[in-house]
Amino acid sequence: MSGLTEFLKYPYHQAIIKNEIPLSIGGGIGQSRTYMLLLRKAHLGEVSVTVWPKILKEICSKKNIHVLE
């Protein structure tokens, strides 16, 4: 679709064309999601520090969910 056929010379792209590996990037469950499961948390913000929008923090606060900042 992109017309970037020069990439077909690389082993990774050849393996995709030959159906030796799936056409995907990443997609693992991830550490944060695993921590959520193990710690029985409802929101990603309870196990992962980032900048959360004020409205999200307000909603979580009302539900007794403490997001990390």
Image (spheres, rainbow, N blue to C red):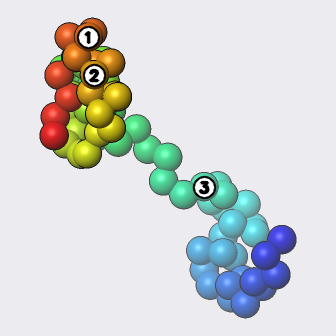
Q: Within 10 Å of the Cα at label 2, are there few (<14), some (14-19), or many (20+) other Cα atoms?
A: some
Where's the C terminus, which quadrant?
A: top left
User: Eyeballing the image, is 52 above or below 58?
Assistant: below
Nearer to the camera, 26 or 66: 66
What label does residue 58 carry, if any?
2
Q: Judge the density around disc 3: few (<14), some (14-19), many (≥20) Cα neighbours within 10 Å.
A: few
Residue at screen point 68% across, 84% down: 7
Q: Position of residue 11 (x, y in %)?
A: 60, 80
**Vertical position of residue 20 compared to residue 52: above or below:** below
Identified by mark 3, the residue type is: Ser
Splitting the image into 4 quarters, where does residue 39 fall?
top left
Q: Quadrant of residue 12?
A: bottom right
Residue with the most extreme top position: 63
Q: Is residue 34 visible?
A: no
x, y percent for residue 44: 30, 31
Give the residue type at disc 2.
Glu
Q: Which residue is rendered at x = 29% and y = 33% of the image?
A: 54
Give the residue type that dot 1 points to. Answer: Lys
Residues tagged 1 and 3 counted as in contact (Cβ below 8 A): no
Q: Which mark is residue 24?
A: 3
* Real-space CA distance between mark 1 and mark 3, rounded to the nearest whole angstrom: 38 Å
Q: What is the secondary structure assignment of the residue under circle 1?
A: helix
Seen at 69% across and 76% down, the residue is 14
Residue 2 lies left or right of residue 48; in this view the side is right
Coordinates of residue 9 in the picture (x, y in percent): 68, 88
- Up-down relation of residue 67 to residue 13 (above or below): above
Secondary-structure class at tag 2: helix
Q: CA distance from mark 2 to mark 1?
A: 6 Å
**Residue holding disc 1:** 62
The Cα–Cα distance between marks 3 and 2, rounded to whole angstroms, is: 36 Å
Q: Are marks 2 and 1 in contact (CB under 8 Å)?
A: yes
